[in-house]
Image: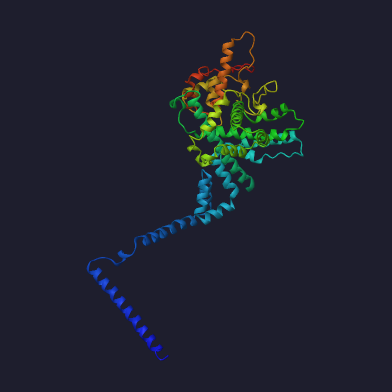
Amino acid sequence: MSLLPLILLLSLVLFISLLFLLSLAILSLAILLSLLNIPLLALVPHHLFLIDKIAMNKTPQLSKLELLNYDTRLEILGSCESFKDLAALIRASPTLYRTFLANKAPLLLSVVGNILGPAARDAAMLAKTRLDKSKDFLRQVDEAVQDYKAHLRVAGPPWVTGLDAETAVALTHITRNTQFCVDMYGHIQRWQFIHELDLSLERVGRPRLSRNERIRIAQAILRRQVLESIFRRGLGEPVDWSQFMRAFMPVFRTWEWQQISDMDHFMSVLFYCLEFDEDEWLTFTNKPDLEAIVKKLKNVLNHYDASLESINTWDASLEVIQELWSSHAQNTQCGLLHFLEGSHRFGKPLSNDNQHSNTLGDNDDSVIELYISGLEPDIDDQPWAWRDALWGNKTCSWGMDLVQLHFSHGADMRQHYGLGRALAYWRLSGMVFWDRDRVERMKRARPFNLCQTGWLIPWQDEIKTS
């Protein structure tokens, strides 16, 4: 027992001796490095300084975001041109995240407007359209018509305002699904131009859709979906469908009905390409919303890891649908919605001249001036293919009824058949969606020999402007 204090004392002396020796070693090393002119910090691992440097640089950047004033934060968030950019910003700064939560609806609506442009008005209408089965159907149709007209009167950004947060979130899903369908339309049409119509890359034009082309396609998709959602609600009701159409005719101009009709034809061919079984077809057609369309398309392409963000990398996988498309497109003349087949489905042409000035056509001078100028029509104006086809003529007709389908006495049978085929190609190729330069390139291809300037002569309407 008497040895324990001695052992502890010896241990303490040994520990102090080791510390003294270590201090001498460090001092000696410092003196040596000083003589060699080498800084002691050079021996510290470089990555430790790098991590510290990144941390020091990151703090001021975050501080700058946190110090932005409220209006600037709103402006930055509202200027995002994709939901991906918006998500990145609100993850980068707690202050931006709190600003987003406090202004969720208007900020989402702003980003939707940045993505869709004027088509955001149609997306908002689709998000809002909820018909009550307990109320009179045609009265609700009239209310929807008035609401739609109010949306379309908005002539510039912000395209959509006043929606609650729940509807705004629904609108973001509609926007993403619309983007998917627009991309799908562009890919299939480009494939068709090259493989089916035998157009060269030079004639097809740039591979990517312009902003105006995307907006025209998006508007047609969304407008068709609004009409279909209302139509499905009316099934089983004792409804006069001509009255339904007459209520909606003033909402859109003649060429806009043409765009909707052509999109219905495209969507119908696409549905047939998806090869539903009978039960799946009935389920799908009873709820044909954009989400269901996109989900089905993704199921077809699921082993190619399809997503909204990666559709532009699908060139090989899209052959699955493109080959099916070629087998159905030429044999499918009508769309799923019978009232969108053409303007004469209900007898007398329905004029929508009261809602819009210059609804039916241009006068000769305006067409010629635009032709000479080489300018692209405004997005809210008649697309170039429509102007070029009518060349100053007026028409109330659209869809399959742009040309007379029934052979009239004394007509040239070959010319009549050729005109019908020309219209089929013109519609199937989506001419009313393309910019002027793409239309002019395509007109030089053999299938469009009959679709030259002024080829579309109205047959049942007022023929010529004065």
Q: Quadrant of the C terminus?
A: top right
Q: Position of residue 356 (x, y in %)?
A: 63, 28
Q: Position of residue 77 (x, y in %)?
A: 52, 48
Is residue 308 positioned above or below 17 on the image?
Answer: above
Q: Which residue appears at 40% of the width and 60% of the height? A: 51
Is residue 355 positioned above or below 88 on the image?
Answer: above
Front-lying residue, 426 or 213: 426
Residue extending farthest left: 35
Is residue 407 positioned above or below 114 on the image?
Answer: above
Q: Quadrant of the N terminus?
A: bottom left
In the picture, residue 222 is in which quadrant? top right
Residue extending farthest top: 410
Report the side of 313 relative to 228 (left or right). Answer: left
Residue extending farthest bottom: 2
Q: Which residue appears at 50% of the width and 17% of the height? A: 449
Q: Position of residue 50 (x, y in %)?
A: 37, 59
Front-lying residue, 54 or 18: 18
Report if residue 164 is visible in the image: no
Q: Position of residue 406 (x, y in %)?
A: 64, 15
Report if residue 224 is visible in the image: yes
